[in-house]
Amino acid sequence: MTVDDIIKEVNGIFIDVLDTDAIVLKYETTAKDIEEWDSLTHVQLVVAIEKHFKIRFKSSEIQGYKNVGEMCEGILKYAGK
Amino acid sequence: MFDFNHLKKNLKKDFSGHKKARLAVLGDSATQLLVQAIRGYGYEVEMDFEIFEADYDQIEMQIFDTSSEVYSFKPDYVVIFQSTQKLMKSFYKLPAAERAGFADAHLDKVRSMYDTIASKLKCRVIYFNFAMIDDAVFGNFANKVGFSFTYQLRKINFELMNLAQRLKNLFINDIESLACRYGTDTVNDMSIYVNTDIVFSLDFMPAVAKNIADIILAISGKLKKCAILDLDNTLWGGIIGDDGMENIQLGDLGIGKAFTEFQLWLKELKKRGILLAVCSKNTEEIAREPFEKHPDMVLRMEDISIFVANWDNKADNIRRIQAVLNIGFDSMVFIDDNPVEREMVRTHVKDVTVPDLPEDPAEYVGFLRSLNLFETASYSEEDETRTEQYQQEAKRKVAQEVFTNEDDFLRNLNMTAGVSPFNRFNTPRVSQLTQRSNQFNLRTVRYTEDDIARIASSGDYAHMAFSLKDRFGDYGLISVIILQKREDALFIDTWIMSCRVLKRGMEIFTLNEIVRTARGLGFKRIIGEYLPTPKNGLVKNHYADLGFTVTGGLWLLDVDSYADRENFIGPEGPAS
């Protein structure tokens, strides 16, 4: 699995959690680019991603990722392969 | 249980037509997601919760400043959520010498919050008790140390129960029990807590929201009154028609213990006032046999208010049960191990609650308990005898068939009614009738026991509680009248009657008493009002039928020209 594969899967999670079809995630996408992505929905996204990939982020990582790409690198690191 | 995302998506749905309730939610942690969960869960139970969410950690600021937003919002419910995490921090700040008094000081604070709210608002307070955190400072030895956090935390939860028994408008959201069911690891998500100060995990949030909704629904009179039970493989293991009475699994036989424990639970529900009905595809005599003869049956015929065993489809049978019990389909729970029967009932009798029982009977009780189907907002001693009352009703139905003339039937019942003002003995039942009656209820004003006590001691009202007996038995307290003394007329604020005494002439007896009261107080006019709800269509023509005339939406009765109307109910001594 590559970061791009992860971004595609995460895109689906974003569409589900944020309840809008109009999301196309790129490596450099940040919360500023998506209206529905605020600190509250961020919590939901983190939980949904953790469940989907069966991973746990470290507390320090949750607010630390600068963009979608970095977060997906993190997912790749835990989910492996 | 719905997951959080599901509840969140509900927020975009159409709430029109749902019953409204106003909630002020105050927390000492971040409560935005909890508020979303509460409103989203409301959609599932047809409630439109309008929620004011106080700013972060402003509980005392908002409550003790009576000019704050909480008060101007005029909530029906003030929901207060203090977390164990914050409680622990304030406990740790205390010097050792003051820790033994920590619980008492906290309870004083809760009490004064309640008193302040109650002094300004006519509303209920829902207070969260505390999920346990074992801080492992003393280990198990904490149980032997009065100033340990464990001891003080448990004391708070225990004393909150006592406080709620004294303060009728204080309701406890039992987080401690809920947390026990879900387990600490599900209750909290520590990394989210550390990052955002949201205490409960997203997986636990819907359960908390449901608990709050359960309390509010029960207070609003939306509650379950009856469990309809299948027999084979539901109340006992095996098929009575094939296996015979000796071979059904109960007690020590096979997995009989699972069914015995299930029956023990049902029996407790029955004692609390939940009606039990049987609905089984069986030959009636065979189906009754275990109830009459099996030594390990916990439930007996006298526990069952109506017993239906035949080969008709269950949807029709449930309609029959409904016709006899005369309660709403939405107050019934249908319990059957067979998924086909469940689907059939679900499709054809809307509004009946049909839980999807687990396949293993060992899990029946635990699963049904986890649904908290039988939340209530009041309890009176009359609840215990309700089954008996419905059985008497079944006998009356048989007697009625003997008489072709309605008047002869009524005369033959030898009815006597008691009238009593509200007093401390009948207050719980009076309040309960105002909260539970939906059909014969002219204005559907709900009163707590505190409200009733206030009305009883106020000079502005006249009030009556009616009880009725006949030769088949005692109906107990079945009608409530609250009359407001207005300047030029006596206004019927509340007229409620139990549907069990419909068509007995009780409303005529009651009207005669109301007029007598009006005369005694020197009023010339009585004013009645009908406020329609989806459920009280039964009394749409109530005042017209009783000879009131309508003017501008209100119903008037002239006291001087009223002559006592005939009925077949005789007077008796004061109601107990």
Image (cartoon, coloured by chain):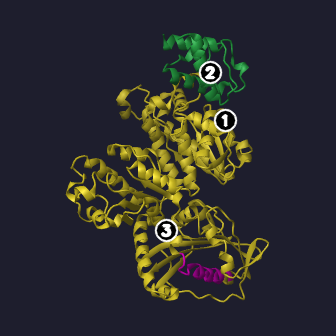
Q: Residue lying furthest right in this view?
A: B552
| Residue with the mark numbered 3 | B323
**Mark 3 is on which residue type?**
Ala
The x, y position of residue B423, in whole percent, is: 54, 69
Q: Which residue is mark 2?
A: A11
* Residue for badge 1: B58
Name the side, left or right, on which B185 lies relative to B524.
left
Q: Is residue B506 left or right of residue B149?
A: right
Q: Colour of chain B?
A: yellow
- The answer as to whether the residues below labels 3 and 1 share one chain is yes
Labels 2 and 1 touching (C-beta < 8 A): no
Q: Nearer the viewer, residue B324 or A57?
A: B324
Q: Main secondary structure of the magenta part?
A: helix
- Same subunit, labels 3 and 2: the answer reads no
Circle nearer the viewer, 3 or 1 = 3
Give the letter of the green chain.
Answer: A
- In x, y percent, where is residue B482? 63, 71
Tag 1 secondary structure:
loop
In front: B480, or B338?
B338
Residue type, label 2? Asn
Q: Is residue B27 magenta?
A: no
Secondary element under disc 3, as helix, strand or loop, is helix
Residue B360 is drawn in which quadrant? top left
Between B326 and B441, the residue placed more toward the observer is: B326
